[in-house]
Image (spheres, rainbow, N blue to C red):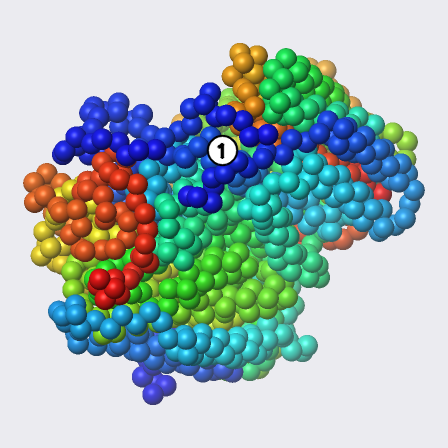
């Protein structure tokens, strides 16, 4: 499926559009590499405190609704799928389909954030805040009291991890919107779809992080 | 040889472990000089010998595998040996004998409190038995500190929320310097303490609250300063010593310069302005109140940061401190 | 693509004019030059703080400032020198300029990203510098919790500044890696890469892998200060020592971000001025990667007295020992390169020789700190201060100075005064040893670091150290004078004044906008001195 | 750069494969949730991580195309995971072996120096008077004699100290338990007053709460949430000796 590259003017220091594409893609993978390490410290902290305070983790996770988390997991997986379809459409030069799939992805991402908003606002309401300001005014439900003194640290990690992930979702929505506009303007073709593929990689990574966050935060037995 | 290496370059060797430490250190110094001599000697020799050599005389040697293997394997073996030696000494440094005397240490900005088995609490003054293993169990009230006795070659961070410990066995009685080695804020360098190793008799006296028969070093110093009048130091001298041992001078100078808190000089019976604009005469009552409840009447221009010394200063000591401040006109 | 037609006398400096053409440039050479001047400015700033710190320590007690100000001064010295000077000094300034040219490329892979990195760096530096007016910063450059989460100074802004600068470092690393992978000229095979490129390659990998961790760590402290998340706060169940793990996971490899490029420069310089191939090219390249890999496995040696477990102490001490092996290989190979060469003792080579001398001392004293028992006494004392200055200043700074003198004619098309350069080297070299060697003894005697006041018995050595710092200052001042004069009125430099074989010397001095008039093709190794002539 | 030339075929993930992967991911998500309902002990965590890893691998290999990508890119991604593992393992070489010395840290647990007042969370006139006295020694410099936040030292702070006589603006809330938490932890420029005895602190809390309108009362649930068992003096949460209490005892020597 080698396409003529005349329509895209690659930068002067590359030899061909192909050469530029491969370089960009590698740059993107390196960027994702730093993303992995960026999140890694939080996962290490999560593991450390899980080892220290297993009981606190167990009690704290009752305050998280696995249905909400599960729903968000499904939403993100769907959005990953629509993103993959968008890339597929862009590679084949199907402009309208690219735009539609990107729009679906955006809607799903919004849905993810809406669910997240409900989760957060409920927690703020009952006084579940990062450790220093943690003050639970009401009990969460029968048999689900927080008795372990280290429960707040779990929520610190919960807010940091999901907050940072949420920020990535937000940034992802920004760039998806940007390539959606560009796709609508017809800037992409089978010879040049680099930005779509790059944003796609980023978006799948966001999904990938959530795939781990869900069982780690919501499903602690 | 040993004296040559150590004179001036190392603190006193206060324990058997410190002796072991010295051997390792000597070896490292020797090894360093050896390699430095080889590297720099060869480098200077080549530069001197081949300076301005003709380019046509250059021998383009690209590599020499045997040589490279040699200088890979020999250092590897050397550092492995070094690791083992270092670890063996380290074990001796950290594993305390089970019969060690346990003393608890609390670090806080910027002083050390020592709590003894008999319930005594001393600030910045650590009294230990000589020739007996002593284990310090340490924690911090605020930020990281580090308890460091150079003569014993021991050091350990003092961490809030956690107990850390060190042990040592002082060979001789005498005074040893203690530092805080982990940066802890404004008066980090003033967070000093003195350790006194005393003989068995005095240690028992100390534990049972009787008067010691030895004169601790700091008192000796002040005796010398009091121009040979002999006998015990005057109240003012005692007070001056106390402001050092209690850590006061970390924040309060005796020469009029401002540190974290106001200087002692000239403060006594002067009129000071407080943060609320009112004025008080800094008499005995005010100063004592400021020592015990420091946040009640803070002098204008200073932050309310001083910790309370209530319960940490005995009545006799308070008197000495007041007398000392009074003497600084 | 065909080579661009060039007007004679036109080069990257004069092809476009005006301030805007600089600020909006995508040319790696101009970005490199902008980095260079930025870094030289921050170096001046950090140097002034260093001199002030040394003056304060001339005598016990108060000398010029009070304790609070002193603490801020050494903190600024550390933060500026680490985050704004030694980390970007060689990769971002010299690397940006030289790396694409050594590869035979027209630019780095992502020129716009490159410019963005520069502005991110400036932005981060400005945020961090704003703390100067917002109450200062007194945590030390290590930002250890819980002090940094409690200090009433402008720690939050400093952390955000360092956080932002981190991304500049990451993006530069990313850019370099892709450039090295994808933009090598025909014939520029892996085994023909100059060692400077190898060093920057390893450095870039460290930047991409390690910097994000410190970014998130500093960000966590920001959250700790603003939202009380308590991960590092023992009062909330957190662990302050965990911060040290996170911090050193980056900051130890960061030491190699600083040192490896300098090693690369030295590997360039020594063959050129001894007219001989570098000894053991392959081993040198492997050693670079050995060091980079081990860099990630040894961070705990900063924490032997921190209260970390004995298991960790054992593991980290053991692993740390292995750093010595590849480092030794490099030092021995440099010396062996000089053997039977034709040595031209220029200022550049003097800086390189100074590097080897100082770096060897730095490395050997590192053994004291890697060995568990000796570290207990020496850590957190002036011994450590002396050790890392021998590695950082002696290593990175001497490497940088060697590189600057080596590539100065290429970068600016002017020659500097060789005699002046030697004088400057002598002042800095002597000054450096006078300043920092006494600090080894101070540390062994037990003087802890970051001390505003000290016991009277430490006075003599401290005073010697302060005098030495004035010599260093004088040396750099002199260096600034003759380099500035060379920029303005130095004689015009030939294209290849040192008869070097690496690609960057095939272009004109200063290079044209597209770096080369022709598409370069590599037919020989970078250090085939004495070999090519034989073939001819 | 001849190695980069040539007509490399970009791999395009077929829609059919993509759909299959998508369905598999959805099913695996349901399985994760379903399995979590059963208790296999430590195995639960292992299963959850295994399933997550399968899902992540599918995303990486197919959606991200790593299966068909260049070796370089695969190496990059796998290397990032390896260094993540190094980070984790070596950090645990400390934390997993540190246990013995660690102090369990209750967050609001209080404990029993000999209090002058039993159950000080119950307001009594005597306790209120005691609280006023404590307030006047410790708080007036910043919060003012009437608690209006106009104390002499308070002017140095930004934001200014809390005016206790007003309803709005309380950062941590003004339930007694919330005020108690502020006293314990400090807030902004305000230092922690955790070193005051328990009943002193509760006295201050009640006094401060009484200064403003609409005094709220302490419910048993509130107390539970801060770790105080309403029926007894010491919380069940304080199984181990709390560090600040330990320090307090050590520092005062009893």
Q: Is residue A43 above or below residue A99?
A: below
Give left or right: position of D249 versus C21. right
Q: Residue at x 23, y 48 (%)?
A: C505
> Between residues B121 and C27, which one lies in front from this camera angle?
C27
> Between residues C181 and D80, which one lies in front from this camera angle?
C181
Q: Whole-percent x and y of residue A7?
A: 46, 20
- Residue A39, quarter of picture: top right
Instruction: Locate the N terminus of chain D and report the quarter of the image it occupies.
Output: top left
Q: Secondary structure at mark 1?
A: helix
Tell me if residue D175 can be seen.
no
Give left or right: position of C211 versus A43. left
Q: Whole-percent x and y of residue C317?
A: 54, 67
Q: Residue at x 51, y 30 (%)?
A: D141
Q: Whole-percent x and y of residue C407?
A: 23, 49
Q: Is residue C304 above or below residue A93?
A: below
**Number of numbered callouts drawn:** 1
Q: Residue at x 89, y 40 (%)?
A: D35
Q: Is residue D138 above or below residue B31?
A: above
- Residue C433, quarter of picture: bottom left
Q: Which residue is mark 1?
A: A18
Chain of the residue that carries numbered disc 1 in the rendered image: A
Q: Whole-percent x and y of residue C26?
A: 33, 30
Instruction: Locate the C terminus of chain D and report the quarter of the image it occupies.
Output: bottom right
Tell me if residue A30 can be seen.
yes
Give left or right: position of B329 versus B152. left
Judge the density around disc 1: few (<14), some (14-19), many (≥20) Cα neighbours within 10 Å: many
Q: Residue at x 48, y 50 (%)?
A: C206
> Between residues B219 and B85, which one lies in front from this camera angle?
B85
């Amino acid at each position: 499926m080698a396409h003529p590259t005349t329509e895209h003017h690659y930068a002067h220091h590359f030899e061909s559009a192909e050469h530029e594409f491969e370089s960009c893609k590698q740059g993107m993978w390196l960027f994702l590499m730093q993303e992995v390490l960026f999140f890694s410290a939080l996962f290490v902290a999560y593991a450390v405190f899980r080892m220290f305070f297993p009981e606190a983790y167990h009690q704290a996770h009752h305050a998280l609704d696995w249905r909400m988390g599960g729903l968000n997991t499904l939403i993100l997986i769907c959005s990953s799928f629509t993103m993959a379809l968008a890339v597929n459409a862009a590679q084949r030069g199907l402009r309208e389909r690219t735009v539609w799939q990107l729009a679906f992805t955006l809607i799903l991402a919004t849905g993810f954030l809406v669910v997240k908003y409900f989760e957060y606002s409920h927690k703020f309401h009952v006084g579940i805040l990062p450790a220093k300001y943690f003050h639970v005014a009401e009990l969460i439900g029968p048999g689900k009291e927080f008795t372990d003194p280290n429960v707040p640290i779990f929520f610190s990690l919960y807010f940091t991890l999901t907050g940072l992930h949420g920020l990535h979702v937000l940034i992802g929505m920004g760039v998806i919107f940007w390539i959606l506009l560009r796709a609508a303007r017809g800037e992409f073709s089978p010879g040049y779809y680099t930005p779509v593929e790059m944003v796609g990689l980023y978006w799948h990574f966001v999904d990938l992080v959530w795939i781990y966050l869900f069982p780690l935060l919501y499903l602690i037995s | 040889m040993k004296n040559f290496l150590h004179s001036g370059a190392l603190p006193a060797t206060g324990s058997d472990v410190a002796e072991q430490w010295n051997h390792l250190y000597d070896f490292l110094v020797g090894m360093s000089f050896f390699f430095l001599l080889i590297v720099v000697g060869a480098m200077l020799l080549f530069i001197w010998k081949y300076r301005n050599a003709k380019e046509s005389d250059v021998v383009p040697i690209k590599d020499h595998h045997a040589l490279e293997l040699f200088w890979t394997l020999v250092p590897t073996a050397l550092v492995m040996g070094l690791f083992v030696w270092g670890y063996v000494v380290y074990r001796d440094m950290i594993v305390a004998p089970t019969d060690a005397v346990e003393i608890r240490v609390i670090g806080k900005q910027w002083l050390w409190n020592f709590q003894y088995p008999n319930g005594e609490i001393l600030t910045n003054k650590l009294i230990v038995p000589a020739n007996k293993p002593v284990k310090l169990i340490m924690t911090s009230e605020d930020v990281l500190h580090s308890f460091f006795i150079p003569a014993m070659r021991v050091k350990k961070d003092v961490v809030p929320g956690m107990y850390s410990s060190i042990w040592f066995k002082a060979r001789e009685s005498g005074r040893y310097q203690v530092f805080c080695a982990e940066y802890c804020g404004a008066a980090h360098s003033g967070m000093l303490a003195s350790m006194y190793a005393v003989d068995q008799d005095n240690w028992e006296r100390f534990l049972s609250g009787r008067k010691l028969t030895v004169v601790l070093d700091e008192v000796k110093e002040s005796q010398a300063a009091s121009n040979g009048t002999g006998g015990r130091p005057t109240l003012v001298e005692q007070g001056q010593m106390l402001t050092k041992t209690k850590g006061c001078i970390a924040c309060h100078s005796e020469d009029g310069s401002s540190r974290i808190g106001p200087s002692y000089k000239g403060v006594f019976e002067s009129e000071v302005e407080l943060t609320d604009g009112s004025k008080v005469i800094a008499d005995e009552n005010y100063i004592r109140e400021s020592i015990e409840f420091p946040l009640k009447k803070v002098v204008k221009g200073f932050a309310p940061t001083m910790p309370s010394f209530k319960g940490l200063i005995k009545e006799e000591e308070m008197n000495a401190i007041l007398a000392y401040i009074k003497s600084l006109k | 693509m065909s080579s661009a037609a060039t007007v004679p006398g036109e080069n990257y400096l004069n092809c476009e004019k005006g301030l805007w053409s600089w600020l909006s440039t995508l040319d790696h050479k101009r970005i490199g030059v902008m980095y260079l001047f930025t870094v030289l400015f921050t170096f001046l700033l950090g140097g002034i703080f260093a001199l002030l710190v040394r003056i304060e320590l001339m005598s016990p007690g108060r000398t010029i400032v009070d304790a609070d100000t002193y603490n801020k001064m050494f903190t600024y010295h550390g933060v500026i020198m680490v985050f704004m000077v030694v980390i970007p000094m060689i990769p971002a300034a010299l690397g940006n300029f030289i790396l694409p040219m050594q590869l035979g490329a027209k630019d780095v892979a992502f020129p716009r990203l490159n410019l963005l990195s520069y502005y991110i760096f400036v932005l981060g530096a400005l945020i961090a510098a704003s703390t100067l007016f917002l109450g200062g910063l007194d945590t030390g450059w290590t930002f250890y919790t819980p002090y940094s989460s409690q200090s009433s100074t402008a720690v939050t802004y400093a952390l955000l500044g360092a956080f932002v600068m981190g991304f500049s470092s990451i993006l530069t690393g990313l850019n370099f890696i892709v450039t090295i992978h994808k933009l090598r000229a025909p014939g520029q095979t892996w085994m023909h890469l100059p060692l400077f490129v190898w060093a920057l390659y390893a450095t870039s990998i460290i930047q991409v892998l390690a910097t994000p961790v410190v970014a998130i760590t500093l960000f966590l402290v920001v959250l700790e200060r603003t939202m009380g998340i308590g991960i590092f706060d023992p009062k909330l169940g957190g662990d302050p020592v965990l911060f040290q793990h996170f911090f050193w996971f980056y900051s130890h490899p960061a030491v190699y971000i600083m040192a490896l490029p300098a090693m690369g420069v030295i590997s360039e310089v020594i063959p050129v001025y001894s007219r001989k191939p570098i000894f053991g090219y392959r081993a040198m390249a492997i050693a670079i990667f050995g060091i980079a890999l081990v860099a990630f496995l040894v961070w705990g040696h900063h924490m032997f007295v921190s209260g970390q477990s004995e298991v960790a102490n054992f593991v980290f001490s053991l692993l740390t020992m292995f750093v010595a092996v590849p480092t030794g290989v490099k030092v021995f190979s440099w010396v062996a390169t000089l053997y039977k060469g034709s040595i031209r003792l220029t200022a550049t080579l003097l800086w390189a020789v100074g590097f080897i001398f100082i770096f060897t001392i730095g490395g050997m004293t590192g053994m004291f700190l890697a060995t568990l028992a000796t570290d207990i006494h020496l850590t957190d004392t002036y011994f450590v201060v002396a050790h890392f200055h021998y590695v950082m200043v002696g290593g990175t700074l001497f490497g940088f100075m060697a590189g600057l003198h080596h590539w100065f004619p290429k970068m600016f098309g002017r020659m500097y005064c060789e005699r002046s350069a030697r004088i400057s080297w002598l002042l800095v070299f002597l000054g450096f040893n006078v300043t920092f060697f006494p600090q080894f003894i101070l540390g062994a005697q037990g003087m802890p670091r970051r001390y505003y006041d000290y016991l009277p018995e430490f006075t003599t050595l401290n005073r010697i150290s302060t005098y030495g710092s004035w010599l260093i200052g004088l040396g750099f001042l002199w260096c600034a004078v003759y380099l500035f004069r060379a920029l303005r009125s130095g004689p015009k430099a030939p294209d290849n004044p040192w008869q070097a074989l690496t690609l960057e010397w095939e272009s004109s001095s200063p290079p044209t906008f597209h770096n080369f008039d022709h598409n370069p093709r590599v037919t020989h190794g970078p250090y085939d001195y004495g070999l090519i002539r034989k073939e001819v | 750069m001849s190695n980069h030339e040539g007509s490399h075929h970009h791999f395009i993930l077929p829609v059919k494969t993509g759909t299959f992967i998508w369905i598999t991911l959805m099913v695996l998500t349901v399985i994760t949730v379903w399995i979590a309902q059963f208790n296999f002990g430590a195995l639960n965590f292992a299963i959850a991580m295994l399933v997550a890893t399968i899902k992540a691998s599918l995303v990486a290999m197919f959606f991200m195309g790593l299966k068909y990508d260049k070796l370089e890119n695969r190496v990059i991604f796998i290397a990032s995971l390896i260094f993540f593992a190094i980070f984790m393992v070596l950090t645990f070489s400390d934390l997993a072996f540190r246990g013995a010395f660690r102090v369990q840290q209750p967050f609001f647990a209080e404990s029993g120096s000999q209090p002058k007042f039993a159950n000080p969370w119950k307001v009594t006139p005597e306790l209120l008077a005691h609280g006023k006295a404590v307030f006047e020694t410790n708080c007036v410099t910043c919060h003012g004699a009437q608690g209006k936040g106009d104390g002499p030292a308070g002017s140095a702070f930004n934001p200014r100290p809390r005016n206790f006589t007003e309803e709005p603006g309380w950062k941590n809330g003004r339930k007694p338990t919330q005020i108690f938490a502020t006293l314990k932890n400090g807030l902004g420029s305000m230092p922690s007053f955790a070193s005051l005895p328990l009943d002193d602190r509760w006295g201050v809390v009640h006094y401060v709460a009484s200064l403003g309108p609409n005094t709220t009362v302490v419910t048993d649930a509130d107390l539970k949430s801060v770790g105080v068992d309403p029926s007894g003096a010491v919380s069940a949460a304080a199984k181990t000796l709390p560090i600040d209490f330990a320090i307090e005892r050590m520092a005062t020597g009893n």
